[in-house]
Amino acid sequence: MSRVIFTCGDINGIGPEIAIKLFSKLFASKSKRALAFICPLNVFEYYYKLLKVDFKYHFYNNELRNGLSLNLIPLDNSKLIIGKATKDSGKAAYQSIVKSIELVKEGLADVLVTAPISKTAFNIAGIKFPGHTELLAESEKQKKFLMMFLSKKVNAALLTIHNPLKDISSLLSKEKIIDALDIIQKTATRDLGIQNPRIAVLGLNPHAGENGNIGSEEKEIITPVIKLSGKRMNISGPFVPDAFWGAKFYKQFDFVLGMYHDQVLIPFKLMNFERGVNYTAGLKIIRTSPDHGTAFDIAGKGIANETSIQEAYRIALKIHSNRKRTIEEEKAY
């Protein structure tokens, strides 16, 4: 049975609230899975009382115990200034992530579900990572990885992540796209159980370059890769991005590879704002996260929706189960 660690995210946002709401729901359903939560003790106690939950918890002691009790891994108390990114909130979020990675690497946990962090708080705290994805990749010294977004409606991946638009063209390369397609193929088959996945690749420019009249990236980089990789994968494109989403062509594919952040995230969040899941693909660590931010504007009000972190939990378990099955099948073969 999978052992799951949850991080607190930014303590001044909705991360602790949605995690605790999910724990309450899971324990009410008599779940006996080993669940752990890394959070400053005062923050946990604040939300435990605010939300009026009554599930049992105990302090972690070098083993994630199964049963109807949360394994609480307390960090030092941290100053709460609800609704604002602060040095303390950035530091606590970072410490929570680092501790969770440590436990997974030591074999004490199987999967990681992270609550939303604030890049502003990270910056204030002097933490030089733009997000979870880059931090997790650095922890494995892995340079080939992808930020993915998973849902029942559409699965998508980003070629570039948190980069200014002015830099996107210079970041494109044939090698980068080939690596991304390889990760998508492996993730789809090994982690999600999708055999021979149908992959759509979006163009970079308006009208996908219109035969080189509105940019040359499609003709010079994207199309040649699709032709080459298409010999061993089921790939189509490059598609005109707005028409692809508007005509709902995504329904014909198992995965979509977009060239930059908003090209994928705007349509994805329109379809899945409370159910989308962020997944870091290409790593040994299985990490999922709700596909929304810290929501500072509603933090501390007890009204945050936990559906997305519940989906992140569900998909993390699915990926772990699929990986275990794949390993067992390979050994049998």
Image (spheres, rainbow, N blue to C red):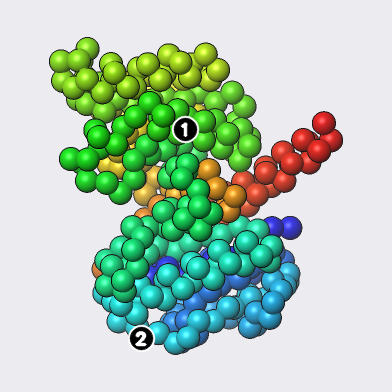
Farthest left residue? Answer: 213
Horizontal and vertical percent for residue 21?
A: 50, 69
Marks 2 and 1 sit apart, C-alpha to C-alpha, by 42 Å
| In the foreground, 199 or 298 | 199
Asked whether residue 79 appears in the rendered view, the answer is yes
Q: Can you tell which mark lies on residue 79?
A: 2
Q: Is residue 167 left or right of residue 57?
A: left
> Given contact means CB atoms under 8 Å apart, are the residues at marks 2 and 1 in contact?
no
Position of the N terminus by quadrant: bottom right
Confirm whether residue 83 shows in the render: no
Q: Which amino acid lies under the numbered mark 1 shown in the image of this protein?
A: Asp
Residue at image point 41% right, 18% down: 226
Counting residues from the start of the chain, the first of labels 2 and 1 encountered is 2
Q: How many callouts does the rendering have? A: 2
Relative placement, left or right, of 245 versus 9 is left
Query: Tag 2's secondary structure?
Result: loop
User: In the shown orientation, is residue 172 left or right of residue 251?
Assistant: left
Q: Position of residue 84 (x, y in %)?
A: 26, 74
- Residue 225 image position (x, y, % from top left): 40, 20
Q: Which residue is mark 1?
A: 179
Q: Quick one: SS at disc 1?
A: helix
Q: Quadrant of residue 208?
A: top left
How many residues crowd mark 1 within 10 Å: few (<14), some (14–19), many (20+)?
some
Q: Which residue shows up at 46% across the image and 45% down it?
A: 143
Q: In the current view of this chain or complex, which residue is farthest to the front?
A: 141
Please name whichever residue, 47 or 87, is drawn nearer the observer in this view of the structure: 87
- Say few, some or many: other residues with alpha carbon within 10 Å of mark 2 (under 14 / 14 to 19 / 20 or more): some
- Residue at (43, 45) in percent of width and height: 147
The percent position of residue 167, horizontal first and vertical second, equals: 22, 40
* Amino acid found under the numbered disc labelled 2: Lys
